[in-house]
Image: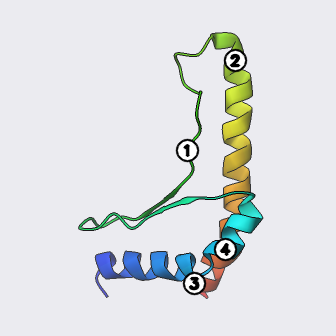
């Protein structure tokens, strides 16, 4: 299977578990198949963060982003493991 087709198959398999993944993550995720491209994306957007914020806010922003990445990994990991089994 070509990597393009394989990537789409993995994305589709994960998307079948979307409700469970989002429940485990704790909120909605943005599922982007990125038509015509080799990659697909599962993302979450945050408002109000960035390097333009006052530097004293950076630790709070970093903690929020780090927490989301930990939750995303925890939500995705068992589903990804099933795909490689």
Please provide percent x and percent y for residue 11.
47, 75
CA gap, disc 4 and disc 3: 17 Å
CA gap, disc 2 and disc 4: 32 Å
Q: Secondary structure at mark 2?
A: helix
Q: Which mark is residue 19?
A: 4
CA gap, disc 1 and disc 4: 18 Å
Q: Residue at x 32, y 81 (%)?
A: 5
Q: Which residue is mark 2?
A: 57
Asked whether disc 1 touches disc 2, contact meaning CB atoms under 8 Å apart, the reply is no
Q: Nearer the viewer, mark 1 or mark 2?
A: 1
CA gap, disc 1 and disc 2: 18 Å
Please provide percent x and percent y for residue 24.
76, 66
Q: Nearer the viewer, mark 3 or mark 2?
A: 2
Q: Residue at x 68, y 31 (%)?
A: 62
Q: Secondary structure at mark 1?
A: loop
Circle nearer the N terminus (2, 4): 4
Q: Which residue is mark 1?
A: 45
Q: Which residue is mark 3?
A: 83
CA gap, disc 3 and disc 2: 39 Å
Circle nearer the N terminus (1, 2): 1
Circle nearer the N terminus (1, 3): 1
Query: Dividing the picture into quarters, in which one does residue 59 lie?
Result: top right
CA gap, disc 1 and disc 3: 26 Å
Depth check, front residue: 9 or 33: 33
């Amino acid at each position: 299977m070509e990597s393009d087709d394989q990537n789409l198959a993995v994305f589709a398999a994960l998307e079948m578990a979307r409700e469970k993944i989002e429940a485990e993550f704790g909120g909605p995720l943005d599922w982007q198949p990125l038509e015509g491209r080799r990659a697909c994306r599962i993302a979450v957007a945050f408002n109000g963060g960035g390097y333009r914020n006052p530097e004293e806010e950076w630790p709070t922003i970093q903690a929020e982003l780090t927490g989301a990445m930990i939750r995303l990994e925890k939500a995705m990991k068992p589903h990804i493991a099933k795909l490689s089994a």
